[in-house]
Image (cartoon, rainbow, N blue to C red):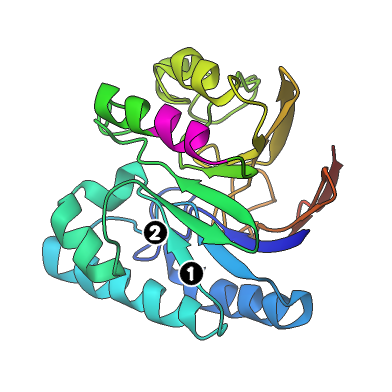
Amino acid sequence: MVLRIGVIADIHCGPDLDTLLGSRAPILVEAFLEAMSRFRPDCIVDLGDRLNSVALSQDHVRTRWVRTRLREAGVPVYHVFGNTDVRALDKEAGMAALGKAAPYECVDAGGVRLMLLDTVDPAVERVGGAVGQAQLAWLAGAIEDRETPCVVCCHHPLDEPPLRGHRYFERHPDLATVRNRAEVRAALGRTGRVRAVLAAHLHRTGAAQIAGIPYVTVGGLVESAYTGSEPCGAFALVTLAHERLNVEVGGLEPAHLSF
């Protein structure tokens, strides 16, 4: 069993906002799609924060643009909600724009189940996140339902990432990760079926292994705080093969992670 996933995160399409150079998103999405044509993924996962949110009408147009553009890769594309995606748009409007059936869902991809979580359930102070109890019960049941390997995809990290030197979250650590992440990790660890957790939100790449599960945070597409004022252009090429996980991070801060 080999599964290849192209991952893009924190696109922040829209006007420039502080160090988030949203105006550069279109050309960076183009670069991501060029990388996908070489990588030939089985699917693409968008880990959320598609928007530098402005207003309902513009956010709707930009959300539709992200959906349409990523689908030009010619493979299934799956989206999760980030905190900026549900400011002007509510989740119902966001789901309609993205073609999502539900805020959180499970899809089959090449013999692996992708658990697409909603970590703004609810949002915490507009930036942080949580996983609601109904979703947590659903997640535990979905993992236990079938003897199939799982990859969990969500916007806010579920591990304990180091925040020293982070331009924002060093001062606001309570907004950096899922608030009830220990509960979620407990659900993920019960069966031994979770092969990886892919997250975003921090705008810089990191990784950890907790109780045998790799937790990978993918850097942000348009973040410029750590790359000399140029947008990082981060994306990830994820390969799950025979119990091994390999992650190649592209952009101005490349990385290779292997578990």
Judge left or right: residue 179 versus residue 256: left
Which residue is tagged 1? 77
Q: Is residue 243 visible?
A: yes
Mark 1: amino acid: Val
Assign a secondary structure to mark 1: strand
Q: Amino acid at mark 2?
A: Arg
Which quadrant of the structure image shows residue 137? top left
* Viewer-closest of 117 and 166: 117
Query: In the rendering, at what x and y percent does residue 221 appear?
Result: 57, 58
The x and y percentages for residue 31 are: 65, 77
Mark 1: few, some, or many residues within 10 Å (few <14, many ≥20)? many
Q: Residues within 10 Å of mark 2 (few under 14, many from 20)?
A: many
Calculate the distance from the C-alpha at mark 2 to the C-alpha at mark 1: 14 Å
* Residue that numbered label 2 is attached to: 50
Q: Is residue 79 above or below residue 157?
A: below
The image position of residue 57, as x and y in percent, is: 13, 70
Relative placement, left or right, of 57 versus 69 is: left
Q: Is residue 117 left or right of residue 123?
A: right
- Magenta-tinted stretch: 139-146
Residue at screen point 29% across, 52% down? 85
Q: Is residue 32 magenta?
A: no
Locate the N terminus and report the quarter of the image it occupies.
Answer: bottom right
Q: Describe residue 154's horizontal placement relative to residue 232 as left or right.
A: left
The residue at 57%/82% (across/down) is 73
Rendering coords of residue 168 (x, y %): 48, 29
Q: Residue at x 28, y 26 (%)?
A: 132
Circle 2 — which element? loop
Let me know if residue 129 appears in the view. no
First in sequence: mark 2 vs mark 1: 2
Give the residue displayed 37% in from the left and 46% down from the top: 82
